Amino acid sequence: MAKPVIWYYDVISPFAYMQATRLGELPSDVDLTCRPTLFAGLLNHWGQLGPAEIPSKKVFTFRHSLWRARKAGIPYKTPKQHPFNPLRALRLAISFGADLATVQRIFHCIWVEGLAPDNEEGWVGIQSALGIDDGDTRTADPAVKAALLANGDDAISKGVFGVPSFVIDGEIFWGDDAFEMVLDYLSNPALLAGDEMKELSNLQPSATRR
């Protein structure tokens, strides 16, 4: 039986883009569901700032992203403006069923070709790459909008706090740098079952931030 694996992502994240390029490395017996999720909604729920909302963290994040991409040989071009509004791209993916090929094509448009979904030139380019010209109609569909909201609610209900994140057997694997951990877990589900791993679920603080 195929192993259900859910991948929560937002096209606004360079790390989600880089992880998207590696999803083909997942085992063949995995049943992957790509779930477009608005990162801003997660931030609002958990009371966090995004990396791009802290000036010094924004600089480091994009330097780190470029370095990681070059190190891994992944095609990469930082968008001219960031953060951008990802809503149209996320809804467009949903309108296609969020299949992996479509998701990867949209990521390529944004993070390799520099086609941002929140300006008309970029939006036209993304639609062209997908072979459509009805993107506005697709993304205005109430069912598509509702699906994106439902994805966010679903992610939050599972404890997802950032993107990209895998959820497998109820366990969260957050960040591009957790991909090897995902592969290890899929080959050895007992990875998180040891006593030390279990103890980490009940880690108690000795101090709290005011």
Image (cartoon, rainbow, N blue to C red):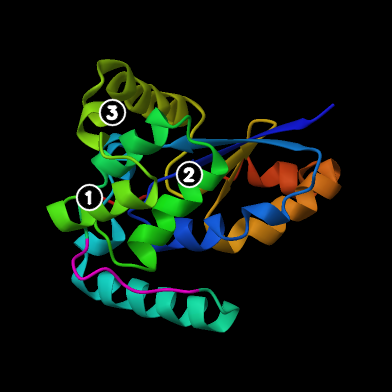
Q: Which numbered dot is residue 77?
A: none
Q: Earlier in the sequence, mark 2 or mark 1?
A: 2
29 relative position to 106: left or right: right
172 relative position to 98: left or right: right
Q: Quadrant of the N terminus?
A: top right
Q: Earlier in the sequence, mark 2 or mark 3?
A: 2
Report the magenta residues as a range: 75-82
> Whole-percent x and y of residue 185?
77, 48
Residue at the image position 49 percent from the left and 52 percent from the top: 104
Q: Which element type, helix, strand or loop, lies under badge 1? A: helix
Asked if residue 81 is among those painted magenta in the image, a careful observer would answer yes
Residue type highlighted by circle 1: Trp
Dot 2 corresponds to which residue? Answer: 102
What is the distance, in whole Å, between disc 2 and disc 1 at their CAs? 15 Å
Q: Is residue 194 visible?
A: no
Q: Which element type, helix, strand or loop, lies under badge 3? A: helix
Q: How many circles with numbers are drawn on the protein?
A: 3
Dot 1 corresponds to which residue? Answer: 123
Residue at the image position 27 percent from the left and 55 percent from the top: 125
Query: Which image quadrant for residue 150?
Result: top left
Asked if the residue at tag 3 contacts the one at tag 2, i.e. Cβ–Cβ closer than 8 Å, the answer is no
